[in-house]
Image: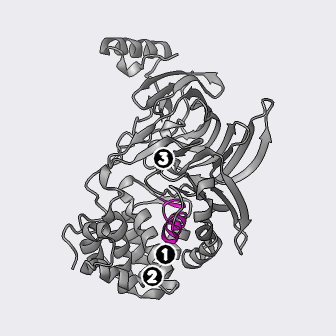
Amino acid sequence: MEHRALSRLAAPAVAALLALTTACTGGPVQGRPGAAGLRDPYFPKAGNGGYQVEHYDLDLDYDPADGRLHGTAVITARAGQRLSSFNLDLSGLNVEGVTVQGAGARYNRTGNELTVRPAEDLEKGEVFRTEVDYAGRPKALTDADGAKEGWISTDDGAVGVGEPVGSMTWFPGNHHPSDKAAYDITITVPQGYEAVSNGELRSRTTDADGRTVFAWHNPEPMASYLATAVVGKYRVTTGRTPSGVALYNAVAPGEAAASAGVLARLPEMVEWAAGRFGPYPFGTAGAVVLPAGTLGYALETQTKPVFPGATDEETLLHELAHQWFGNSVSPKSWKDMWLNEGFATYAEWLWAEDHGGTTAQQEFDAFLAGDTDVDEDARSGWDAFPPAAPPGPEDISSQPVYVRGAMVLHRIRQEVGDEKFFALLRGWAADHRHGNASTADFTAYAQEKTGHDLKKVWDVWLYGKDRPE
């Protein structure tokens, strides 16, 4: 049952209610609502204020035959202020009940906001448990750049992907990258289906109705846009890297033959990246290869990137590099996306350089010169705007964020030399491991760790509006 929000009551009624509360308690109301939205420069309504999530426990039941999702989300969070109410982001789906600290809570829906009013105010610093029961047929969202995200149907199931805000289509939460949490995701599906999510598969059991229950555990902090749930008839293979990282690959049967050669290099890639960027930041690695055409892009979902059909070596390496840059070290806001994409693109250049291909310097020179051997779309758009200042939300995944972001890194390498540059990459990943960072954090860190004045690099390459020469 939905309840009308207090903030929408007529002003006289609100005044009367506050007066009554003051008269009964001898003072004003102590708690206050948590903010609806974190005022992200590109997605101001994403996320919510007043609390930080520590853990999500998602129990999902999905039947591909009718497309219905039944979910229970248990969200453990810490109040950053005394809270009279707080918000969760949720798109579509029907809320069937909410409790806070085990007691029934009032709630209402406005757009993508689920406002929850606990029976009693939550004290500042209090760790509280919210349980939301919900159901429905989740739908995809269309991004500002035209891409699809959220809960997307496949030939024999579905995939949940969330960059930047699509995760709110399949579970309620604080959907902004600045609020990272641990996850346990349990997915119940009909017999014969696989269900894949982030982290380690803790168990695979059969319930009383003969359905299969997959329990996934992701103990490291994760931004909600990196969470995934994949249901379908996948072929699963497991293994370990030479250093002992567990591997879990799930491949759509129609993509198995074309994917085999590239995925066979994943153990080597994990070891190579650990040598360049520091120890692999998670307990598991892997990949999910979706049926061809499911998505128009690959995505670095934590520990198991998803690919829209059989992929190539460069894309696999790119999404693997994100496990360090974007997943372990996550952006403070969506304006900081070049810290994800510029680093992962530069990782592609380094992989090629270390394996007998084009060097990073040659890539840099080719883009700068408009070399015809470089991809036309990338060549024509890399200088459209500075990577640290995309014009709008439709631009956060555009070429300047990727290519010019990588070129910023190469300019640092040119200025400080290889020894200091690679120490910088490793140090950045280590010192911000499992945290969040902004562009300002990086520029300050780079100057401190290298001992070089890099102001010209920032002014011309990172923030400059004109095409660098």
Instruction: Find disc 3 in the rendering and name its residue.
Output: 162
Q: Secondary structure at mark 2?
A: helix
Image-based side of 223 in relation to 438, left or right: right
Residue at 25% across, 68% down: 380
> Do residues under tags 2 and 1 come within 8 Å of each other at their CB atoms?
yes
Disc 1 marks a residue whose amino acid type is Leu
| Pointer 1 local density, CA inside 10 Å: few below 14, some 14–19, many at least 20 | some
Disc 3 marks a residue whose amino acid type is Gly
Q: What is the distance, in whole Å, between disc 3 and disc 2 at their CAs?
A: 32 Å
First in sequence: mark 3 or mark 2? 3
Nearer mark to the viewer, of 3 and 1:
3
Image-based side of 249 in relation to 447, left or right: right
> Do residues under tags 3 and 1 come within 8 Å of each other at their CB atoms?
no
User: In terms of depth relative to the viewer, which is nearer, 191 or 315?
Assistant: 191
User: In terms of depth relative to the viewer, which is nearer, 365 or 459?
Assistant: 365
Q: Position of residue 281 (x, y in %)?
A: 61, 65
Disc 2 marks a residue whose amino acid type is Phe
Task: Answer whether residue 194 is magenta in the image.
Answer: no
| Pointer 2 local density, CA inside 10 Å: few below 14, some 14–19, many at least 20 | many
Tell me if I can see residue 129 in this picture: no
User: In terms of depth relative to the viewer, which is nearer, 161 or 107?
Assistant: 161
Which label is found at residue 51?
none
| Pointer 3 local density, CA inside 10 Å: few below 14, some 14–19, many at least 20 | many
Which label is found at residue 421?
2
Q: Which residues are magenta?
A: 312-330
* Image quadrant in which the C terminus is located: bottom left
Image-based side of 72 in relation to 299, left or right: right
Q: Position of residue 237 (x, y in %)?
A: 71, 60
Q: Position of residue 53 (x, y in %)?
A: 56, 43
Which label is found at residue 425?
1
Q: What is the distance, in whole Å, between disc 3 and disc 1 at their CAs?
A: 27 Å
